[in-house]
C-alpha cells in the first residue's frame, strides 16, 4: 500500500494517511476518486474527509454534484504537514507512485485523435 506504518500511526489510520497523500499529489479531489484509487469503501473515505475538515485540516466546496476537498491553506500547521507529505510522496517506490498517482486530471483536447485510430 501507499503508506508506511509511521504515517498510519501519525494520522490514526491508513485511510486518513492515504487521503492526505492523494490531496498532496493532486491538490484537490473528491471522495469517490480517492476510494477508487486506494480500494477503500466510499464511507471510509468520507468519514476521514469529514473528520479532517471538522478539525480545520481540509476545506470543501460543492462543484455540481461533487464535493471537492483541498488543504486549508490558512491553517499554519497544514503548511508543515504538506512539506512532510511531499517528502513521503518523493520516497514512494516509483512503481507504486505511478500506479496510484497517475490519474488523468484534465479532459482530452477535442481535436486530438485517439491512439487506436492512428495506428
Image (cartoon, grey):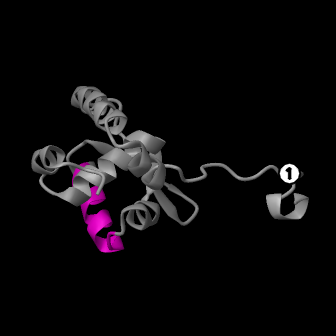
What's the magenta bit mostly, secondary-structure-wise?
Answer: helix
Quarter of the image for the C terminus: give it: bottom right
Percent across and percent down for residue 72 are: 34, 37
Quadrant of res 116 = bottom right
Does residue 46 lie above or below 12 as drawn? Answer: below
Does residue 75 lie above or below 31 as drawn? Answer: above
Q: Residues within 10 Å of mark 1 (few under 14, many from 20)?
A: few
Percent across and percent down for residue 37 are: 42, 61
- What segment is highlighted magenta in the picture? 40-52
Percent across and percent down for residue 57 are: 26, 42
**Of residues 71 and 89, the one drawn nearer to the viewer in this rendering:** 89
**Of residues 14 and 79, the one drawn nearer to the viewer in this rendering:** 14
Quadrant of res 45 = bottom left
* Residue 119 within the magenta-colored segment of the rendering: no
Q: Residue at x 31, y 47 (%)?
A: 20
Disc 1 target residue:
112
Residue 60 in view: no
Amino acid at each position: 500500500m501507499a503508506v508506511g506504518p509511521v504515517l498510519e500511526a501519525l494520522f490514526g489510520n491508513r485511510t486518513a494517511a492515504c487521503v492526505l497523500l492523494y490531496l498532496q499529489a493532486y491538490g484537490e479531489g473528491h471522495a469517490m476518486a480517492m476510494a477508487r484509487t486506494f480500494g477503500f469503501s466510499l464511507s471510509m473515505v468520507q468519514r476521514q474527509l469529514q473528520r479532517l475538515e471538522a478539525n480545520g485540516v481540509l476545506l470543501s466546496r460543492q462543484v455540481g454534484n461533487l464535493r471537492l476537498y483541498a488543504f486549508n491553506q490558512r491553517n499554519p500547521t497544514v503548511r508543515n504537514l504538506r512539506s512532510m507529505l511531499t517528502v513521503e510522496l518523493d520516497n514512494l517506490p516509483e512503481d507504486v507512485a505511478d500506479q496510484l498517482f497517475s490519474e488523468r486530471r484534465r479532459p482530452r483536447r477535442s481535436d486530438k485523435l485517439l491512439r487506436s485510430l492512428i495506428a
